[in-house]
Image (cartoon, grey):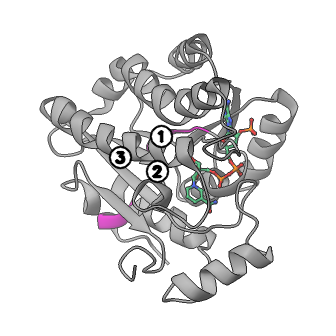
Amino acid sequence: MAIDPLFSVAGKVALVTGGGSGIGAMIARGIVERGVRTYITGRNADRVDAAAAELRGQQGECFGLVADFETRGGVAALAADLSAREQRLDLLVNNAGTNAAGSLAEMEEADWDLVLGVNTKAPFFLIRELLPLLRAAASPEDPARVINVGSIGGLHVPNWEAHAYGASKAALHHLTRSLAKALGPDHITVNTVAPGPFPSGLTDVASEAVKRSVASHVPLGRPGQPEDAAGTVIFLASRAGAYVNGHVIPLDGGYIAAL
Ligand SMILES: NC(=O)c1ccc[n+]([C@@H]2O[C@H](COP(=O)([O-])OP(=O)(O)OC[C@H]3O[C@@H](n4cnc5c(N)ncnc54)[C@H](OP(=O)(O)O)[C@@H]3O)[C@@H](O)[C@H]2O)c1
């Protein structure tokens, strides 16, 4: 069946950070299958290349790039790598993220540095480093899109301690608004998708704790699925989502609404 042009993303170029696993891979698969030339990142070359080869399949173009966001240098190296391969970037998905266990009493400064570095600072600097490519893709009719992956953990306080994680995602949500204002005149939109529970390396939806949380908190009664993650990004990246700017969209089966 032909894709409605209102929702088409074919022919675009995208970068999905952390696109080798979990939610990033769900998003990458959805856009690769719809004709987007897609770059995914991971910290391990063999793993990210294997993930890209798997996503490429028969269907489209997908390439792996190595990137570690713990340092500013890692962000700059990724931007240089992509800029050597592409002249424009239609879609940047800042999906890579990390967590650090630890209660109020236990968290160390290094935990804060890691979580804020990867979840908040890296998206900011990656957007800035990639502005020439984003500007090259942007037009009034078809803005370039930045989509951050936040979390419902940045919209409410869960029943467990996740101080740095929640703060890093709340900061990313606010950055979404400030960058939407700053980059609107360049025809670049900035939005955030804030997932509830999805199966991934960070969230084991088969665990009893997550099953209980889904049963008691998610009105739809199930965790997120690949089509949910890919579908929201495809909407935002297509003509249909071109006027959405500066918003945090919970993708949570109603979790936040029902609190
Ligand atoms: N799953 C959920 O229920 C849920 C809910 C709310 C929000 N989220 C958010 O969704 C995003 C994706 O997470 P996920 O749940 O899909 O978990 P995941 O499968 O563990 O994916 C995390 C990704 O981030 C990358 N990453 C981690 N640390 C990095 C670093 N220092 N430098 C570069 N890349 C790094 C990982 O790349 P490697 O391949 O190198 O490991 C991996 O691909 C995160 O931003 C997370 O906060 C997830």
* Marks 2 and 3 in Cβ contact (< 8 Å): yes
Residue 111 % position (x, y): 65, 31
Residue 242 % position (x, y): 23, 53
Mark 3 packing: few (<14 Cα in 10 Å), some, or many (20+)? many
Amino acid type of the residue that numbered disc 2 sits on in the rendered structure? Gly
Q: Within 8 Å: ligand 1 and the Cβ of disc 3?
A: no
User: For the residue labelled by badge 3, is the local secondary structure a helix, a strand or a loop?
Assistant: helix
Residue pictured at 84% horizontal, 38% vertical? 47
* Marks 2 and 1 in Cβ contact (< 8 Å): no
Which residue was labeled with disc 3?
173
Q: Nearer the viewer, residue 106 or 119?
A: 106
Measure how far apart labels 2 and 1 are at the Cα level.
Answer: 9 Å
Q: Nearer the viewer, mark 1 or mark 3?
A: 1
Which residue was labeled with disc 2?
150
Q: Within 8 Å: ligand 1 and the Cβ of disc 2?
A: yes
Amino acid type of the residue that numbered disc 3 sits on in the rendered structure? His
Magenta-highlighted residues? 6-17
Furthest residue to the front? 105
Decide which of tag 2 and tag 3 comes sooner along the chain.
2
Which residue was labeled with disc 1?
168
